[in-house]
Amino acid sequence: MTVTIYHNPDCGTSRNVLAVIEAAGYTPTVIEYLQTGWQREPLLALLAAAGLTPREALRETKSPARELGLLEPGVSDDTLIDAMLQHPVLVNRPIVVTEKGTRLCRPSETVLDLLDRWPAGPFAKEDGSLMIDATGHRVG
């Protein structure tokens, strides 16, 4: 199974998702989109595959969304996409792509739905909360 993660290493959720993927034995393609930026058509295709509208994919906190006026009702999808191209941090993360689908993995446990195998339990997130218990079952 191939795994691709659109990753921000400064984001705890993104780090947790990457850790789960790697602990499960996968070597993912890691795209640090804050460095690479976005291109319109691939971004639109990624959002469509994840079943997200630009509004649903918009990172509202810890981003310039409010300052740019993007949280106002009536802001068009085209305006949101244009802003995401200018400010990659506006795209919420992490987004993971596997043969099982494409998802915005918030909360981080969402990634488990996209993997054929999971890490051995117990497996905890950075904050110490369990994601997989000692018997190998999802927590929460």
Image (tube, rainbow, N blue to C red):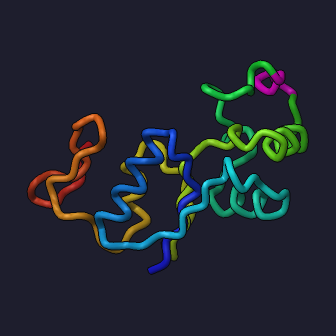
Q: What percent of the width, then of the height, locates residue 22?
A: 35, 65
Q: Is residue 70 magenta?
A: yes
Q: Quadrant of the C terminus?
A: top left
The residue segment tinted magenta is 68-74
Most foreground residue, 29 or 116: 29
> Residue at coordinates 49% horizontally, 71% vertically from top-left?
3
Residue 112 position (above or below residue 82): below
Q: What percent of the width, then of the height, locates residue 16?
A: 38, 48
Most foreground residue, 45 or 2: 2
Q: Is residue 34 left or right of residue 119?
A: right
Q: Is residue 20 left or right of residue 88?
A: left
How would you classify the magenta stretch by its main secondary structure?
loop
Q: Image quadrant of residue 40?
A: bottom right
Q: Image quadrant of residue 125?
A: top left
Q: Image quadrant of residue 97?
A: bottom right
Q: Quadrant of the N terminus?
A: bottom left
As drawn, which residue projects farthest toward the bottom? 1
Residue 101 position (above or below residue 18): below
As drawn, which residue projects farthest toward the front? 35
Q: Is residue 65 left or right of residue 18?
A: right
Residue 33 position (above or below residue 65): below
> Residue at coordinates 9% horizontally, 59% vertically from top-left?
135
Q: Is residue 124 left or right of residue 52?
A: left
Q: What percent of the width, then of the height, locates residue 56?
A: 67, 40
